[in-house]
Amino acid sequence: METQVLGTRNLHEALDRLAQSDAALDPASYGALLKECGNARELALGKLVHSHIAKHGSSDRDTFLGNFLVHMYGRCGSIDDARRVFDRIRLRNVFSSNIMIAAFTENGDLASAKNLFDRSTVKNTVTWNAMINAYVGAGAMEEAKDLFKAMPVRDVVSWSAMIKANAGRGDLEMAILLFKLMDLDGVRPNRVAFMCVLEVCADLEAITLGITIHELIREAGLESETKIANTLIHMYGSCGSIQKASEIFELMPHKSTVSWNSIVSAYAWSGDLDQAQHLFDRMPQRDVVSWNSMLAAYSQNGHGDRALELFLVMDPSLQNEVTFVIAANACASQAALEEGIAIHSRAVFYGYGSDTLVANALVTLLGKSGSVEGAKSAFDRIRSKDAVSLNSMIAIYAANGSGEAAVEALRSMAAEGVSPDSITFMSALSACSHSGLLDLAWGLFPCIAGDYGIAPAMDHYVSLLDLLARAGRIDEAADLIAHMPFEPPVLAWTILLGAYNAMGQQGSNAVERSMELEPENSAHYVLLSNLKSPKNRGRV
């Protein structure tokens, strides 16, 4: 009977045969079926197996079958059934607890998972890892760190989980530190750890560390594995070592589409668009990533016309929202309004009209083409506005000298729940600067930190400083420099110097400070000479 039931590749057919049988299966066969039902998320079929177990004398209170049932119910999202079976298991072991914890975490019940974890008298590394991954998945990094530190023994899964989590949330330096600490702890990295830290090296352009990791990969015998090699190509390409990326690609025994995409992107990143196109043309099979990478390469390197040519020969069935955004941006760079509107119409036709990315690209296109009203109309039609939508509209207002409209857009969108970011405020301050709206900018500046919890960056300070200096409010400009929470850049001193240019000693101080920060800039010496000229000498 087991052969008849399990000999088919069709799960539904196997369960039909099981339902027609009065004979019990052995526990291993039941376990195999339950595992298949869980992996396929087939709750109804899983319950059929459970019913067959109960009907034919086997007990779900048995540890072996109980564990499989808990796993099946957890994977199928029926957490109450999973908990009922778990509670009925007569002799629960560490695997029972691990499976139940995994079921809780997979279904978003972190509190119940932690409660069971705390009550479990016997824990192994899998138990700890399951709880750490649950915290990581929920974004609770502090709790994950505390649990990681408390682990009696950490294995490669524990370390890899923390490395990947820190890299994913942008804490790249911590990801690298954890990788180094894992080595000091005597734990050999696995594929996940290697690939993750290579991605970090790519993001940081840390070529020296990347070469060291590459050597460790070679020693581990993993260099020829396709996924590892793809990540190495990406790392070397991002770090500007295109020759090394090419060597790895050419030596790969098996090249996937991802491999081709990686090397095309590497050449595009280096600015060698001809070689990127040559490799693109050689690809045995192209996917949407291949096309989008090549489109972006042309668009971002100032060849919007070639991007549009490539877009027009692309199979429409491969085009996605990213494709349309790149094509629209290419039109914006060429001020090709008519073509851009046609591309947006095509995006709407293929069902991407309500996509925020596509709508944002249309706003940018209309704005760069000089149609502020058109951009505003497109902006108002966006159903789910985000910070990019807001930043695009404010940048358009700034470019067209509409400072009041920019600040009003910021305030109205914040009231609607769209959170501005650092770029939003930089665009708004720039809009005020272009419009000469000092008081509006002066009132907006404290809101950056006070209302939105964003620490003003150097660019924010310099923008406001420029406004103060051009308005002749020298004392306030000097006070702003004095209260910057970081070392004022040379540009700040240069702006202040320009405002002080015939005002005597204070002007000399500004020049001297600028010369200390940037002694090779001859403009400072010319300005100091102007301050000491006969017409200003009495005031120096």
Image (cartoon, grey):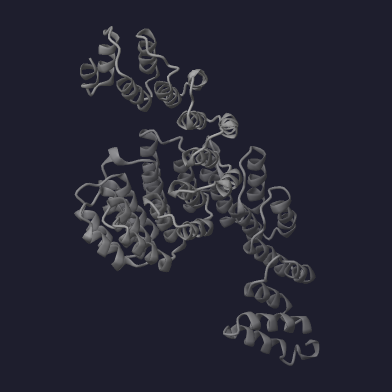
The residue closer to the viewer here, 97 or 340, is: 97
Question: Can you tell which quarter of the image residue 358 is in?
Answer: top left
In the figure, 275 relative to 407: above or below? below
Q: Quadrant of the N terminus?
A: top left
Q: Is residue 191 left or right of residue 161?
A: left
* Residue 196 in picture, x, y percent from top left: 42, 53
The residue closer to the viewer here, 328 or 334, is: 328
Question: Can you tell which quarter of the image residue 515 is in?
Answer: bottom right
In the figure, 394 relative to 496: above or below? above
In the figure, 270 relative to 164: above or below? below
Q: Residue furthest bottom?
A: 534
Is residue 321 visible in the rendered image? The answer is yes
* Residue 101 in picture, x, y percent from top left: 51, 31
The residue at 32%/54% (across/down) is 228
Is residue 504 visible in the rendered image? The answer is no
The residue closer to the viewer here, 17 or 195, is: 17
Q: Quadrant of the C terminus?
A: bottom right
* Residue 304 in picture, x, y percent from top left: 36, 56
* Residue 36 in picture, x, y percent from top left: 33, 25
Q: What number of labels is visible?
A: 0
Question: Can you tell which quarter of the image residue 433 is in?
Answer: bottom right
Q: Is residue 477 left or right of residue 220?
A: right
The residue closer to the viewer here, 62 or 155, is: 62
